[in-house]
Amino acid sequence: MSRWFGLPVLASAHGQKVDDLIIYVHLMMFVLLLGWGAFYVIALMKYRKSRSPKADYVGVTSHTSSYLEAVVAVIEAVLLVGLSIPFWMAHVNAAPKQEENPLEVRIVAQQFAWNIHYPGADGKFGRAAVNFVNEQDNPLG
């Protein structure tokens, strides 16, 4: 279904769930667009000047619009509670498992570059000093 909407090739294991959520939200927005467009056309035809030259100050007496708003709110709640929050809890909020001997690196941000300093074979960083900084060969000193 993702290829019908022009979404890119999946690059992760949970990419299909993200694509599904995007598709559901866009389909709901398309249904809302059709509904509001139909309402607009009906209102233009029903309340045109030639059909009702005198203004009606009573207004709408049915509760149809309230029911439609409630349906839209329920659908949005289902998208949020039923799809988005479980996905977030399963894939984004889960902490990665700690390794016994993790690799520690130092990362220094610079405009248009990330400078990464790796430890040596013994797992310790070498000495760094400002007077060793060379933008071409040794940006971290």
Image (cartoon, helix red, strand yellow):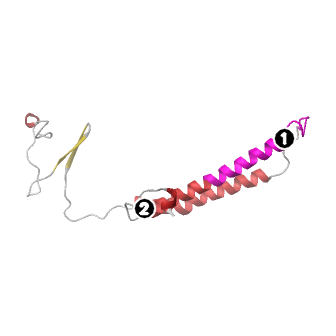
Whether 54 is among the magenta residues is: yes
Question: Residue 24 appears in which quarter of the rendering?
Answer: bottom right
Q: Position of residue 82 (x, y in %)?
A: 55, 63
Viewer-side residue, 116 vs 50? 50
Q: Position of residue 64 (x, y in %)?
A: 79, 53
**Image mark for residue 47:** 1
Q: Position of residue 37 (x, y in %)?
A: 71, 47
> What span is in magenta?
29-56
Q: Does 105 sit above or below residue 138? A: below
Question: Residue 111 appears in which quarter of the rendering?
Answer: top left
Circle 1 Cα neighbour tier, 10 Å, few/some/many (<14 / 14–19 / ≥20): few
Closer to the chain start, of discs 1 and 2, is 2
**Badge 1 element:** loop
**Image mark for residue 15:** 2
Q: Residue at x 45, y 63 (%)?
A: 16
Viewer-side residue, 24 vs 124? 24
**Badge 2 element:** helix
